[in-house]
Amino acid sequence: MPNHHEPATGDVDVLITLLDDVPLPAYAHPGDAGADLVTTVDVELAPGERIVVPTGVSIALPDGYAAFVHPRSGLAAKHGVTVVNAPGTVDAGYRGEIKVTLLNTDAREPVVLRRGDRVAQLVVQKVERARFVQAERLPGSHRGEGGFGSSGGWAAAT
Ligand SMILES: O=c1ccn([C@H]2C[C@H](O)[C@@H](COP(=O)(O)OP(=O)(O)OP(=O)(O)O)O2)c(=O)[nH]1
Ligand SMILES: [Mg+2]
């Protein structure tokens, strides 16, 4: 059984403060990309309702990293609960509490989430910062300006 109270082990140290009586974000299985975040409050989401929930954690990412707040597939598939701004971006310089903007996409059923429930997962990644170099023209490419379904319909590309 996964133990959600095991401290996360990983490749990069991320300083974290616990603002509430919550476990450290934990990877449920070795090799997981996302460490689960919990809500520190009970919420009931009406159909179509969104709400910002606190997670009780704040972090200091090293420069060159960002963390992304992703939905959990189980909550999404079983209850229609997603993260509105998925994936939410946590900047390396952000020291505030990580919050999750949940949305109940279900048209009929309300969803109850209890304090301590795992509502999202945090993916820590290296990110590049671009220098935006203004140019008169862009180099050509195979795709060109095609997008937004240019390659075909929803089934296999035809
Ligand atoms: O799901 C999220 C997304 C963001 N944040 C925090 C960390 C992030 O560094 C900060 C700002 O996020 P973002 O840049 O996405 O929001 P904004 O609307 O552009 O606000 P700001 O003007 O503060 O950048 O809010 C969260 O706690 N959860
Ligand atoms: Mg911003």
Image: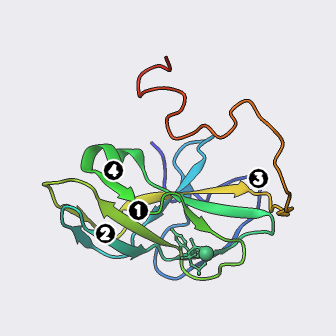
Q: Which mark is residue 50?
A: 2
Q: Label 3 to label 4, Cα distance in Å?
A: 28 Å
Nearer to me, 32 or 155? 155
In depth, the one of 29 and 74 nearer the eye is 74
Q: Residue at x 40, y 45 (%)?
A: 73
Mark 1, secondary structure of its residue: loop
- Disc ID at residue 11: 3
User: What type is the residue that disc 2 sits on?
Assistant: Arg
Please say if the residues under marks 1 and 2 sit with CB atoms less than 8 Å apart: yes
Compare marks 2 and 4 and give the one earlier in the sequence: 2
Q: Quadrant of residue 132?
A: bottom right
Q: What is the distance, in whole Å, between disc 2 and disc 3 at their CAs?
A: 34 Å
Q: Which sits earlier in the primary sequence, circle 3 or circle 1?
A: 3
Instruction: Identify the residue shown where x is 72% and y is 78%.
Output: 93
Task: For marks 3 and 1, give the one nearer the viewer.
Answer: 1
Disc number for residue 143: none
Q: Which residue is mark 1?
A: 84
The dot on residue 75 is: 4
Residue farthest to the left, as pictured: 108
* Circle 4: residue type: Leu
Check whether the beta carbons of the residues at disc 2 and disc 3 lie within 8 A of each other: no
Residue toward you, 28 or 112 = 112
As displayed, is residue 1 above or below residue 154?
Answer: below
Residue sticking out furthest to the top: 158
What quarter of the picture does the N terminus occupy?
top left
Q: Position of residue 66 (x, y in %)?
A: 69, 63
Label 2 CB-ligand 1 distance < 8 A: no
